Amino acid sequence: MSSNIELLAPGGDIEAIKAAIIAGADAVYCGLDSFNARNRASNISFDELVGVIRLAHQYDCEIFLTLNIVILEREFKTMAKLLSKLANTTLDAVIVQDIGMFYLIKKYFPTLNIHASTQMTTHNIGQIPFLKKLGATRVNLSRELNLREITEMAATGSQHNILTEVFVHGSLCVAFSGLCYSSSASVGNSGNRGRCSQACREEYETTATGNNFPLNIKDNSAFFDLPALIDAGVHSFKIEGRIKGASYVHTVVDSFRKQIDGYLQTGKLTQDGERLYKVFNRDLTNAFLRGDLNQSMFIENPRDNSINHIIAAKNAISVVQIYDAKQELQHEKEEINATVFDKIKHLSVDKASLSLRFSGEVGSPLRIIATIEEDGLLPGSPSNKRTITVLSNQPLINSKEPNIDMVTLDKRFKSFNNARYTLTTIDAGAVKPNLSLVFSSLTALKNELALILNDSKAVLPEVTLPRLEKNPKADMDASPKLSLLICDKSDVHLAGSTDADIYFKLPDAYKRGCTEYVDFLQRNPRLIPWFPPVLIGKDYDVALTILEQVKPKLIVTNNTGIAYRAFELGIEWIAGPFLNTTNSYALLAMQETFNCSGAFISNEINRQQIQTIARPKNFKMMYSIYHPILLMTSRQCFFQQSVGCEKPRIDNGCMLSCDKSTSITNLKGDSFAIDKQKAGYPSIYNQDQFMNMEIINDLAYLFDGFMIDLTNIGAGDKMSPDKEQLIAQFEQLLNGNTTVEANLNTLVPQSTNVQYHNGL
């Protein structure tokens, strides 16, 4: 039994971070007030981060900083400045989603450890070596995985010297993380930018099954599954909750700390978990972990369920009994708050004070005595004070133009008033008048002091990113080529009416050992395989078999595990739109690291954000101009709470055979299609199709190809337009015939390109 188990806690604000530390967290993840996926959390300033690191390290606790959003081109200059500052701290790791960020950190900031965020949707063993090659030292596994799948992932991580972490408590997204676009498409706030509006928690018109919160699922908790996760080889147990307060964080972390320690000491679980119900919860489930996806995962209450729990636990029935139960819970919550804040009130993240006293005379070196004072670690303990003495490497000399005076010293040393220290005093009273020091010696003295004050870690210079070259596409005079996406074998005949590239969307799920698509693609070599974003377990194995046996000249993949294997096999590959590509550094990362030949640019970004992207040399840029707008995809079933299903739980047969469709309507009257293709994951789509004809006129010079999606996925019960007509109209549009725009608007009466205008 391994005792090398990390308990990783959330820290949305300073109080929550302190609570996590004092409760026994081995590590805390927190975010700054920018560049992180929880903009609803209070978050912290850079100066506070430095104080947090100092405090945490005194308790042998590590600090990980979340930079887990997709990054826009214009933000990299600011990001480089931030990373330059972070590289000069003792921060333990950064948590990253954006592929371009991996590239940037690995190339320019190699001292920073990189952890792959849950937003990377890591769910198959092929993604582990992909992330390793990008620079990750740790990956957070998708919350949808079961114990068998986690065990396989952890073993693969071990083979590649990659640590794995798993969420063990807190809110669950009903959608695959990183693949939810509901906020982006509906209100312009992208979950990939930390601005999720939580459409899954909203109230909807009552469904046929009588549910008003049909997408709302219970909170995750693996409190009683810790032994199995330890046996699975998981390194880090991660608690969700960066928008939760200090009392919540302390209660959950302390509960898990006691459970882990008790198990490691006795081989038994010693805690009953009741404390977890006394802080915010939506009731608790471990159904994903058990691989038992059933209707009991859903709950009609999207808010705090702790009151309902205590009423049920006490079997309170009468008005008086219910009132007494509520009062008891309220009293317990107040007690928790008081206890937690009493425990953390002495903890300080304030900067240490620094005073500099200079002395010297002719013929002797310039002396600096630096005094550092910081708050004591324990309540009532005295402050810690230490002094450092440094001497110049050359002696002071008499000078008619002295440079060792208050004006010069203040100018040269005021930079020590920084994120780590408050410079309280610069005292040159003990320096004799009319003295000078060789400039290089004064600089060396300052650098020596800076090194010591930085824990003997060399101060790294700020990185200035080189200007990226914007390369033109191969044939600037050529119009972007049309490409089609199909998923139905009966649509292969469309190839006869066009010279467009034809992508064939492969399923999300397969029967074990399936070779059907190997034979099909070999018979139709013109088809370019299109791999979906989620391929778990045996489905990934079958997808690999298709890739390895067909060995097509070109593929499009939305899954990084498939991308890695294509790279190994020397198969040309294009990054699909669900890899959320929004910047030049992501293109460089994929080209230079994995020999990627092109990428679809994310449909979440707008015209201005697209046109700033710098194309690498010999690299294709693609864009989807017509497709259903995916809002979310889930491993859970959306039909159980909407129209109902006679099956009590989801199994592999559901994935392969179910092809239901329905819709749900929110209280604003907006309707959303729920669609389930055979061998596909349940998904929710916007009521409008995405159709962007403007980009053809605006930015055609940037793109090698524009794609139209003819899969009919997400159409629900709406009549689909004639596919041959769509192809003909779009081909004319790409050839400059703008008169067909009216025809296309008639063929597709419900369409929008609002994302092209809103952007991220």
Image (cartoon, rainbow, N blue to C red):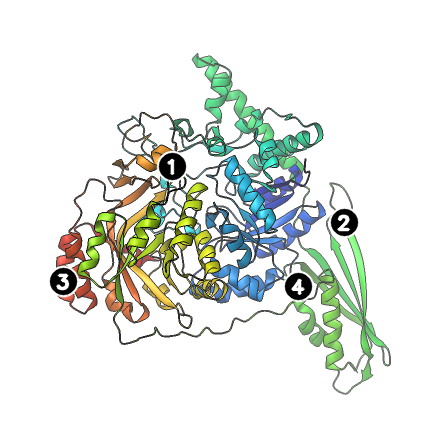
Q: Amino acid at mark 3?
A: Val
Element at label 3: helix
Q: CA distance from mark 2 to mark 1?
A: 48 Å
Residue named by callout 1: 201
Which quadrant of the figure contains the N terminus? top right
Residue named by callout 2: 383
Q: Are marks 2 and 4 in contact (CB under 8 Å)?
A: no
Q: Position of residue 252 (x, y in %)?
A: 58, 34
**Few, some or many residues within 10 Å of mark 2 (<14, 14–19, 20+):** few
**Few, some or many residues within 10 Å of mark 1 (<14, 14–19, 20+):** some
Q: Is residue 583 above or below residue 722?
A: below
Q: Amino acid at mark 4?
A: Asn
Residue 722, visible in the rendered structure: yes
Which quadrant of the figure contains the C terminus? bottom left
Residue named by callout 3: 740
Q: Are marks 2 and 3 in contact (CB under 8 Å)?
A: no
- Sequence order check: which comes first, mark 4 or mark 3? 4
- Sequence order check: which comes first, mark 2 or mark 4? 2
Q: Amino acid at mark 1?
A: Arg
Q: Is residue 449 above or below residue 346?
A: below
- Sequence order check: which comes first, mark 2 or mark 3? 2
Q: CA distance from mark 1 to mark 3?
A: 41 Å
- Sequence order check: which comes first, mark 2 or mark 1? 1
Q: CA distance from mark 2 to mark 3?
A: 76 Å
- Sequence order check: which comes first, mark 1 or mark 3? 1
Residue named by callout 4: 417
Element at label 1: helix
Element at label 4: loop
Q: CA distance from mark 4 to mark 1?
A: 46 Å
At a point 79% along the width and 54% down the height, the residue shown is: 385
